[in-house]
Amino acid sequence: MISVAILAFGLVLILQAFIYILNVFCISQNNLKAALLAEEKMAEFQINLKQKDYILLEDLSEDLEIGSIKFKWKLQLTLDKEYQELNKLYAAMSWKEGERKGSFPIVTYLRIPPQDEMPEF
């Protein structure tokens, strides 16, 4: 009788560990999707910035849905105070899947070359 109780207790612990591992896997999968999406949006913005040679006057944001996950990204471009030829690009990704919420910020610097150094496309 005691051995059955010990086996049942062990089985419950194994099942709880399995559920925890699945939860961690889903969270890491969402983080990876958000990081890749943020990188893609930042690269897209950088290409558009070089091709069109415009200055971002307001923040850009968009809502996306990939599968059952609702993503929202926001880009902010500001001039760096210390280095005038660098622009600080801040991208924030946030998402919601069911009851889970997450966010993923990325900050990078862009050099906007003078007009005579701009590549021709």
Image (cartoon, helix red, strand yellow):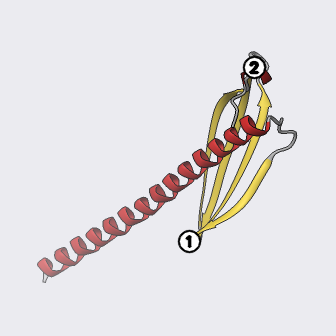
**What residue type is disc 1 on?**
Gly
**Which dot marks residue 85?**
2
Q: Secondary structure at mark 2?
A: loop
Instruction: Tell me whether circle 2 and circle 1 mark residues in contact (CB < 8 Å).
Output: no
- Could you tell whether 65 is left or right of 83 in the image? left
56 above or below 24? above
Mark 2 Cα within 10 Å, few/some/many (few <14, many 20+)?
A: some
**Which dot marks residue 67?**
1
**What residue type is disc 2 on?**
Glu
Q: Earlier in the sequence, mark 2 or mark 1?
A: 1
Residue farthest along the right direction in this orientation: 57
Q: Secondary structure at mark 1?
A: loop
**Residue nearest the observer in this picture, 105 or 19:** 105
Quarter of the image that includes the C terminus: top right
**Residue nearest the observer in this picture, 9 or 101:** 101
**Which dot marks residue 95?**
none
Task: Give the percent coordinates (x, y) of residue 16.
Answer: 34, 69
96 above or below 36? below
**Residue nearest the observer in this picture, 113 or 18:** 113
96 above or below 42? below
- Could you tell whether 60 is left or right of 32 in the image? right
Residue displayed at 79% across by 24% down: 115
